[in-house]
Amino acid sequence: SAATSLEAVIRVDQPGVAANAGSDQLICGNTATVIGNDPGTGIGTWKLVSGSPLTVINGSGRMATVSNLQVGVTELEYEIDRGACGKTSDRMLITVDERSNAGFMTGGGTFCNSATTTLTLTAFTGTIVRWESSTDNFVTVQPIVNTNATWMLTNLTRTTAYRAVLSGGVCGQSMSNAVIVTVLDGHYIADAG
């Protein structure tokens, strides 16, 4: 009897690379660029996991532009399809910081020497970092350690302007309108004539 031999070719696909979505991002604005690792022989794609349904992902492959992001956190997933070796994915977060709105300060006016008044900041967003005062239209500034929306001034002795400084995180700082507290000397001698 004759021996039969068969030849077989076995193909082994390389497992490919694991997906890496990159570092989380903290941004100011509504657009970000995301770049995943090189998918090698696989195919890389991005998709929205959570966040605003209005979020748009433009791009194919490892790089995409994400637009119409809203204030808060958006979660994306980068996936590499490695064919017969399956899929691998990694997630990343894009946090959009809110821009500060410095609001409106009230409480300025004209007062007698040693009087008391309260300044109030309203309609603001962001975090109050400090208040500032100046006697020369903010050419020189004196920082005031106060992170509250009100500031009580007592024993007024000098005309001074005040404002608040707010932070929007990575979006930078903004300043409220300045109010002027005008102080009258009060050392007048009555003269009936």
Image (cartoon, rainbow, N blue to C red):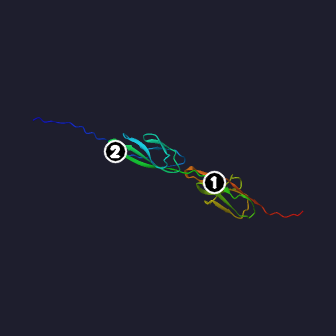
Is the residue marked by circle 1 packed among few (<14), some (14-19), or many (20+) residues within 10 Å?
some
Quadrant assignment, res 60 = top left
- Rendering coords of residue 190 (x, y %): 85, 64
Q: Amino acid at mark 1?
A: Gly
35 with respect to 125 (left or right): left
Residue lying at 60% horizontally and 57% vertically, measured from the top left = 128
Is the residue marked by circle 2 packed among few (<14), some (14-19), or many (20+) residues within 10 Å?
few
- Rendering coords of residue 42 (x, y %): 37, 41
Residue lying at 43% horizontally and 44% vertically, measured from the top left = 46
* Residue indicated by mark 2: 86
Q: Is residue 167 above or below residue 59?
A: below
* Residue indicated by mark 1: 103
Q: Which residue is at the front of the view, 145 or 167?
A: 167
For marks 2 and 1 on the same chain, the one whose residue lies earlier in the sequence: 2
115 with respect to 74 (left or right): right
Residue lying at 43% horizontally and 49% vertically, measured from the top left = 91
Q: Which mark is residue 43?
A: none
Q: Is residue 81 above or below residue 114?
A: above
Quadrant assignment, res 108 = bottom right
Residue at the left extreme of this rendering: 1
Q: Amino acid at mark 2?
A: Gly
**The N terminus sits in image quarter:** top left
